[in-house]
């Protein structure tokens, strides 16, 4: 004779909800588990949201599931990594659902190495490289750690932002969203981002030829 289950494991997607709408009978099922004081765990491979986020989303669907009764694939990942290498570090591509449990188990979330290829080369795609810095001097050092220097941007107080912009080796610089594309503003880069300028008086000078004249001036040496 089969014994009565002491706890329940149930999937979330396709079993309790579909596209954020509760399936028929899901609310009643959860209510009966609570009434009979049966522990239960809702499983999901959704690693975007934290259990707290998912609990709130389920609540909007009419389902009451405490966050401690939700187990995500991100939680499983964090537990597995911590079992294999406690206190380790990981480069994470993901959102709060993944970064939060990794942080909670004591993992260090590393950022991009400033010398790595993805930080040094232009990526023609929807990629944003984020590198942490300690202070303005460190930010300037990281920004100048490149063989290129076409353009840059900085946001902050006007005086401080301008001071940072002056120290970074790029040919053009936007301060607090300023637009440097104008017919009278020279455009061009430093280092391996090109030689010369286009637009502005400096751009016109690229099409001119300089000529030097020298003549003897009588009595100049006497």
Image (spheres, rainbow, N blue to C red):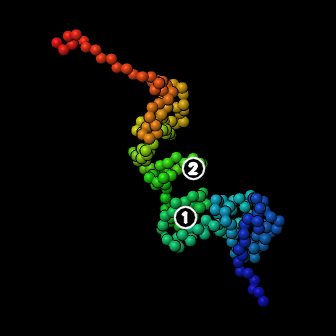
Relative to 74, is 208 above or below?
above
Q: Residue at x 54, y 69 (%)?
A: 81
Relative to 122, does residue 203 appear above or below in the rendering?
above
In the rendered structure, the answer to whether residue 200 lies left or right of residue 69 reads: left
Q: Is residue 160 left or right of residue 221?
A: right
The residue positioned 50% from the left and 66% from the top of the image is 106
Identify which residue, 201 or 195, lies in the foreground: 195
Q: CA distance from mark 1 to mark 2?
A: 23 Å
Query: Total label count?
Result: 2
In the rendered image, the quadrant that contains the N terminus is bottom right
Relative to 147, residue 207 above or below: above
Q: Secondary structure at mark 1?
A: helix
Whether residue 135 is visible here, answered yes or no, is: no
Q: Nearer the viewer, residue 219 or 38?
A: 219
- Relative to 92, is 135 on the left or the right? left
Counting from the top left corner in percent of width and height, residue 187 is at: 49, 31
Image point (49%, 64%), residue name: 89
Give coordinates of residue 45: x percent, y percent: 67, 65
Q: Which residue is mark 2?
A: 127
Out of 172 and 106, give the one closest to the viewer: 172
| Classed neighbour count for the residue bearing mark 2: other residues with Cα under 10 Å, few (<14), some (14–19), many (≥20) | few
């Amino acid at each position: 004779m089969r014994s009565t289950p002491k706890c329940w494991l149930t999937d979330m997607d396709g079993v309790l909800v579909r596209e954020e709408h509760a399936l028929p009978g899901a609310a009643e099922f959860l209510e009966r588990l609570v009434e009979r004081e049966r522990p239960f765990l809702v499983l999901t491979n959704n690693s975007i949201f934290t259990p707290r986020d998912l609990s709130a989303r389920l609540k909007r669907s009419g389902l009451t599931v405490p966050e401690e009764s939700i187990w995500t694939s991100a939680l499983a990942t964090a537990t597995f990594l911590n079992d294999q290498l406690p206190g380790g570090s990981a480069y994470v591509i993901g959102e709060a659902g993944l970064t939060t449990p990794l942080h909670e188990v004591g993992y260090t979330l590393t950022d991009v190495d400033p010398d790595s290829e993805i930080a040094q080369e232009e990526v023609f795609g929807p990629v944003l490289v984020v590198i942490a810095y300690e202070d303005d001097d460190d930010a300037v050092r990281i920004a100048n750690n490149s063989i290129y220097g076409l353009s840059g941007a900085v946001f902050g107080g006007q005086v401080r932002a301008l001071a940072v912009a002056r120290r970074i080796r790029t040919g053009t610089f936007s301060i607090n969203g300023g637009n440097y594309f104008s017919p009278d503003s020279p455009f061009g880069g430093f280092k391996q981002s090109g030689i010369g300028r286009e637009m502005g008086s400096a751009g016109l000078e690229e099409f001119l030829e300089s000529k030097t004249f020298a003549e003897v001036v009588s009595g100049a040496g006497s």
